[in-house]
Image (spheres, rainbow, N blue to C red):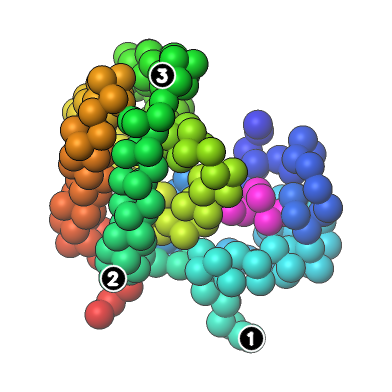
Amino acid sequence: MTRTEGLISIDGLDGSLAQRVYRALRGGILDLTFNPGAVLRKGVICEQLGVSRSPVSEALARLSAEGLVDVIPQSTTRVSRFSMDEIREESFLREAVELAATVRVAVERTDDQLAQLSRNLRLQALLIEDRDFQGFFEADEAFHDLILGFTGFPNVAAVTTQMSLQVRRARMLILPEEGRLAETQDEHVAVLNAIRGRDADAACHAMSHHLRQLISRVEPLERMHPDYFRSH
């Protein structure tokens, strides 16, 4: 997808005009094309996407409801800054769901599900070789979505994603750290090996270890990039 000043083209996206504008802006916020605190100017967005102000306003209102932008009436709209309290809370919720899902999958997994997870990890290895951070992030997300989907509950993955939007953005900050891609894949391998062995306790432990890396790695970034975080 082509980008114009940080925005993906909406031409190939599905949905109404407002939905397409929303998806373009949301994608740019979640992948940190727009850094926390960045100003989003309606006029510039309209010009870049070739749309009127109405769908842009609707998209920004929706993003505000999700906590991804802060709209200051009669002033400006900014990409929301990180809050460590929110990240910790989302991490807590995400861990509760993912550990339950991992235990369930370890007990009930099928050979086909195991094959899908194995293919995903092979893809992760290739992306590490290419130093493709965005591609690896997407494969990482897919690995977790597969496990959530294998629970048999169709809405679990979508709900987990929606309740951990700030965590998703924070994870984009730490992936470029030297060696983090390989460490992440090793953690995924430990989860997969436990699922392969139908060892629910080991799978739960491996997933817990993996998920808890986030907070310990994000906390130092609050000092390194204070402009990305809300002041206390």
Vertical arrangement, residue 223 with respect to residue 184, above or below:
below
Mark 3 and mark 2: span between their CA atoms? Answer: 35 Å
Secondary element type, mark 3: helix
Residue at 52% x, 74% y: name it.
70
Residue at 75% x, 54% y: name it.
19
- Tell me the number on the disc at residue 114: 3
Mark 1 and mark 3: span between their CA atoms? Answer: 53 Å
Q: For this rendering, which residue is in front, 199 or 39? A: 199
Q: Is residue 170 visible?
A: no
> What span is in magenta?
21-28
- Tell me the number on the disc at residue 74: 1
Q: Which numbered disc, 2 or 1, marks the residue closer to the eye? A: 2
- Tell me the number on the disc at residue 216: none
Q: Which numbered disc, 1 or 3, marks the residue closer to the eye? A: 3
x then y, percent, for residue 68: 51, 64
x then y, percent, for residue 230: 32, 73
> Quarter of the image containing the C terminus?
bottom left
> Quarter of the image containing the N terminus?
top right
Left or right side of 14 for 136 = left
Residue at 25% x, 34% y: name it.
200
Mark 2 and mark 1: span between their CA atoms? Answer: 28 Å
